[in-house]
Amino acid sequence: MKIPFINHNHSDESIHISHDHIPDHIAIIMDGNGRWAQKRGMPRVVGHKEGISTVVKIVNAAVKCKIKVLTLYTFSTENWKRPKPEVDTILKLPKQFLQIYLPELMANNVRIKTIGDTSHLPPHTREAVQYAVERTRDNNGLQLNFALNYGGRQEILNAMKEVFADITDAKLSIDDVDEDAFSSYLYTAGLPDPDLLIRTGGEKRLSNYLPWQLAYTEFWFTDVLWPDFSEKEFIQALEEYRLRKRRYGGL
Ligand code: IPE
Ligand code: IPE
Ligand code: MG
């Protein structure tokens, strides 16, 4: 059985990866931007800007590895607690990212979506992302989800309210509310649960990311800060994932 590896002596087309046990869906908590900048004596926002180039590298690696879905934690419902200038900078990044990289994403057949409550984002963020969603809607390669103003508990509460409303309107019977039916009320409706969660930046927590969907996901943590994260660590995560035995409570 072939083991995934990168050959650094050749062009970036040279990822050789076994298609056995490749995760369909990878979720990433892109953490450590602020510390990356602070370590260099620079303002935290410099780290966020630097993180953009990691995003495109990892998206391209996911395309090459034929991952079906990649879900990136971009801004959490808790991140509003940060100083306003930092929040403003972070929320300008999607537009800056798409202005540079949308043509490359189109060429790579990537379909962009969002998860989270985008209605409360500044119009410039919402419109830039909405444009990219529309432009890429007919692509059928990698689905790239940006979790923007995403909070897992908020997602579950919203879903619960919608389920309740549909029961009240007799569109749904309470006996039909099983795991699959409930999942269809989440932002991730129709997607498989993540097989692999990657968190950079050293913290070992979920930070309110996909609590329902990650119930049986394999976790992979690294101390590498997001701006330093590269295809090399991404492939390492895939290699380790391949060796995991997923039992789902069975034997
Ligand atoms: C992650 O990097 C990016 C966002 C939360 C938007 P951080 O900004 O959390 O960086 P650290 O964890 O403070 O280093
Ligand atoms: C999680 O990182 C959110 C994103 C990466 C967008 P945080 O830096 O906000 O998480 P905590 O505060 O360390 O839990
Ligand atoms: Mg952080």
Image: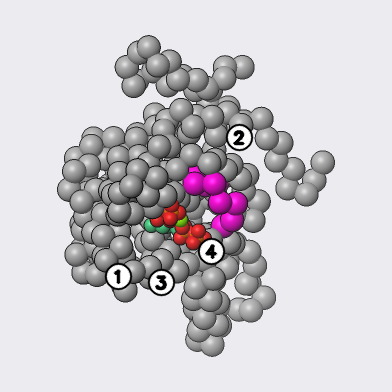
Which residues make up the magenta segment?
A: 197-206
Q: Is residue 89 above or below residue 218?
A: below
Where does residue 164 sit, x and y in percent of width and height?
55, 82
Which mark is nearer the camera, 3 or 2?
3
Where does residue 10 sit, x and y in percent of width and height?
35, 13
Of 141 and 38, the residue lying toward us? 38
Label 4 crowd bin: few (<14), some (14–19), many (20+), radius 10 Å: some
Mark 2 or mark 1: whose residue is earlier in sequence: 1
Residue designated by label 3: 81
* Quadrant in the picture for the N terminus: top right
| Amino acid type indicated by mark 2 | Tyr
Where does residue 146 sit, x and y in percent of width and height?
37, 54
Give the alpha-carbon distance from disc 3 to disc 2, as whole Å.
34 Å
* Quadrant in the picture for the C terminus: top right
Mark 4 or mark 2: whose residue is earlier in sequence: 4
| Amino acid type indicated by mark 4 | Asn
Mark 3–mark 1 CB contact (< 8 Å):
no
Mark 4–mark 3 CB contact (< 8 Å):
no
